[in-house]
Image (cartoon, grey):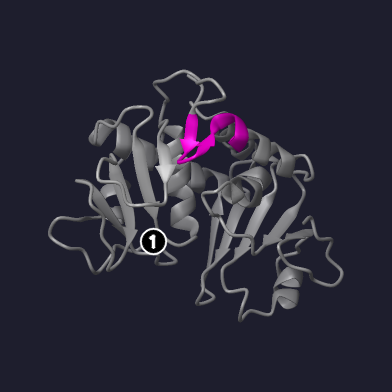
C-alpha cells in the first residue's frame, strides 16, 4: 500500500532507482563525513517505521517528537516517522508516541530514544534509566516496511502546523528545479517549518544527491564543492557553482 505521505512515496520511488547510488552525504559540525546510499537510507527509514508501528503500536496520526540537530540519523527518523503516517513535531509533547532526543536531553512522553549523533551511528553513551538507546532499538527492526494505511487527504497533518498538501508543494517546488544528475551542496536547515522539504526531501525526490554541510561556519566550502563535484548549491554562494536559492 502507498505510504500515507505522498512526499515520502516520491522519495522512496526516487531512491529505488539505482539504490546503491549515494543519496545523502552529511558533514557534521565537527567535519565528519557520512555517506548513505538510497538502500541504506531506505533501510533506516523502514526500521524507524517498524519501531513505531510494530513495536510501540503507534497509529496513523500519532505525534512523534524529533528534537535532535540536523544529521543523517535525523533524516532516517523523519523518513520513518512519515512512512508510518506520524505527525512530527520538534517540541516536547507528553502525549507523543515517541520522542527522539540528543544525548543529555530528555522528553516528557513514555517512549524516549537517545540518538548518539555519531557519524557511524554508534550507540549512545549517555542513556538514563527511563530512556532507550536509539541505535540498538532500531537496528533489530526489519529492513523493509509495508505501509498499513491509505493516502490521506491533502489537509491531513504531516508536521505540527503543516499539512500533507503544503509539504508536497514545498517538495515539488524544489524537485522541479533539479535533475537526477545534480549533486546539491546545501547549508539550508532542515527546520520543521517546511524547510526540511525544500532543502532535503525535494532534492531527493528529484533523484539528486544531497551534500549537507552542518560545518559551514568553519569548512572550506569551495574546496568541498570541487571535491564533491557539486552542480548546484542551496543557501550558500560558491564561485563557479550555480545557486538554486
At 29% from the left and 41% from the top, the residue drawn is 96
Residue 241 versus residue 156: which sits nearer the camera? 156
Quadrant assignment, res 172: top right
Quadrant (top left, top right, bottom left, bottom right) of the C terminus: bottom right
Q: Position of residue 162 (x, y in %)?
A: 53, 38
At 77% from the left and 45% from the top, the residue drawn is 178
At 34% from the left and 33% from the top, the residue drawn is 62
Q: Is residue 97 above or below residue 199?
A: above
At 61% from the left and 78% from the top, the residue drawn is 217
Residue 18 versus residue 94: which sits nearer the camera? 94
Quadrant assignment, res 242: bottom right
79 left or right of 94 in image: right
Query: Is residue 162 inside the magenta stretch?
Result: yes
Secondary structure at badge 1 equals loop
Q: Residues within 10 Å of mark 1 (few under 14, many from 20)?
A: some
Q: Going by the picture, which residue comes out furthest to the right?
A: 240
Q: Position of residue 129 (x, y in %)?
A: 12, 60
Query: Is residue 92 inside the magenta stretch?
Result: no
Residue 142 in sight: no
Residue 10 versus residue 100: which sits nearer the camera? 100
Q: Which residue is mark 1?
A: 121
Residue 109 in sight: yes
Chain part drawn in magenta: 157-167
Q: Going by the picture, which residue comes out furthest to the left?
A: 129
Q: Position of residue 64 (x, y in %)?
A: 35, 42
Quadrant assignment, res 102: bottom left
Q: Position of residue 15 (x, y in %)?
A: 60, 40
Amino acid at each position: 500500500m502507498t505510504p500515507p505521505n505522498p512526499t515520502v512515496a516520491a522519495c522512496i520511488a526516487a531512491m529505488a532507482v539505482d539504490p546503491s547510488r549515494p543519496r545523502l552525504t552529511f558533514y557534521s559540525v565537527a567535519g565528519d563525513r557520512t555517506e548513505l546510499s538510497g538502500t541504506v537510507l531506505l533501510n533506516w527509514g523502514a526500521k524507524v517505521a517498524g519501531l513505531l508501528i510494530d513495536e510501540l503500536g503507534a497509529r496513523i496520526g500519532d505525534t512523534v517528537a524529533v528534537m535532535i540537530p540536523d544529521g543523517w540519523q535525523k533524516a532516517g527518523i523523519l523518513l520513518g516517522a512519515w512512512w508510518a503516517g506520524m505527525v512530527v513535531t520538534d517540541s516536547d509533547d507528553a502525549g507523543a508516541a515517541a520522542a527522539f532526543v540528543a544525548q543529555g536531553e530528555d522528553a516528557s512522553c513514555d517512549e524516549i530514544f537517545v540518538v548518539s549523533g555519531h557519524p557511524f551511528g554508534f550507540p549512545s553513551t549517555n542513556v538514563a534509566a527511563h530512556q532507550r538507546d536509539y541505535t540498538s532499538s532500531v537496528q533489530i527492526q526489519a529492513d523493509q516496511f509495508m505501509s498499513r494505511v491509505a493516502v490521506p487527504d491533502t489537509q491531513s497533518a504531516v508536521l505540527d502546523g503543516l499539512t500533507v498538501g503544503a509539504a508536497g508543494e514545498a517538495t515539488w517546488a524544489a524537485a522541479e528545479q533539479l535533475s537526477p544528475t545534480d549533486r546539491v551542496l546545501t547549508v539550508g536547515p532542515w527546520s520543521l517549518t517546511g524547510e526540511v522539504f525544500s532543502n532535503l526531501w525535494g532534492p531527493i525526490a528529484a533523484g539528486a544527491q544531497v551534500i549537507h554541510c552542518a560545518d559551514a561556519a568553519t569548512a572550506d566550502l569551495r574546496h568541498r564543492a570541487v571535491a564533491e563535484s557539486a552542480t548546484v548549491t542551496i543557501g550558500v554562494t560558491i564561485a563557479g557553482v550555480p545557486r538554486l536559492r
